[in-house]
Amino acid sequence: MLPFLKVEQVTKSFARGAATTEVLRNINLTISRGEYVSIIGHSGCGKSTLLNLIAGLAKITTGGIILDNREVNEPGPDRAVVFQNHSLLPWLTTYQNVKLAVDKVFSQSKSRSERHTWTMHNLELVQMVHAKDKLPAEISGGMKQRVGIARALAMEPKVLLLDEPFGALDALTRAHLQDSVMQIHARLGNTVIMITHDVDEAVLLSDRIVM
């Protein structure tokens, strides 16, 4: 059986003037459908760079990434990213932030009422229906991150990419959100790649850890 996601001999270099910095060299990784994989390593080792390559947010120098038999070379709705910073639009409500993604991805395939129902379903997944009319400035950091996760899930991505999503949260909020992510993964069986520097977090959440 072919792997769902395959990173093959990937190298990434950054050029600045005459200087070239090689961040990743000949990286190989295969991930199965529905697997939760954490990538750990010290700061500056290239974890987030690899995630950005999988997301299509950066160009590969050499090598290739194949997702579900298609080459990854640009961003797409089949990959959704949740960053450490929630990245919500401050002038939109919780509901509107999630609906924005839903409208973008499903404008041709779902009716207006279906898009509303789907938006509410994903807010319910992260237990944020009660705050659907609140602006980002009116909710806590943990709640903002829940909304970011709901927005990503609402796109029905083939792969959910998490870049240290709990790093900026206090310990209690972090624990609650970790529980939520575990429950959502168990329920949806989606494929998840998470970047973290917290080994305990990786052990708790993952099927497999990549160093």
Image: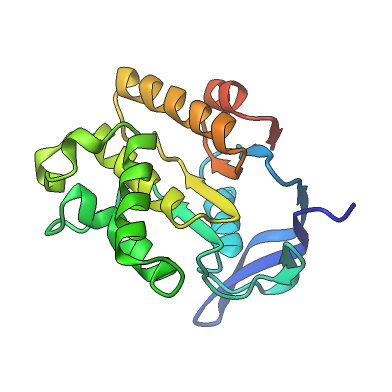
Q: Is residue 167 visible?
A: no
Q: Position of residue 40 (x, y in %)?
A: 60, 37
Above/below status of 58 relative to 165: below
Q: Position of residue 150 (x, y in %)?
A: 37, 45
Q: Residue furthest bottom?
A: 17
* Residue at 67% across, 74% down: 61
Above/below status of 79 relative to 183: below
Q: Residue furthest top?
A: 172
Above/below status of 95 relative to 176: below
Q: Position of residue 50 (x, y in %)?
A: 60, 56
Of residues 154 and 210, which is closer to you in this image?
Answer: 154
Q: Position of residue 1 (x, y in %)?
A: 90, 52
Q: Is residue 161 visible?
A: yes
* Residue at 56% across, 38% down: 188
Q: Is residue 31 left or right of residue 124?
A: right
Q: Quadrant of residue 25?
A: bottom right
Q: Which quarter shows the C terminus?
A: top right
* Residue at 45% across, 40% down: 164
* Residue at 29% across, 58% down: 99
Of residues 88 and 168, which is closer to you in this image?
Answer: 88
Q: Quadrant of residue 185?
A: top right
Above/below status of 97 relative to 209: below
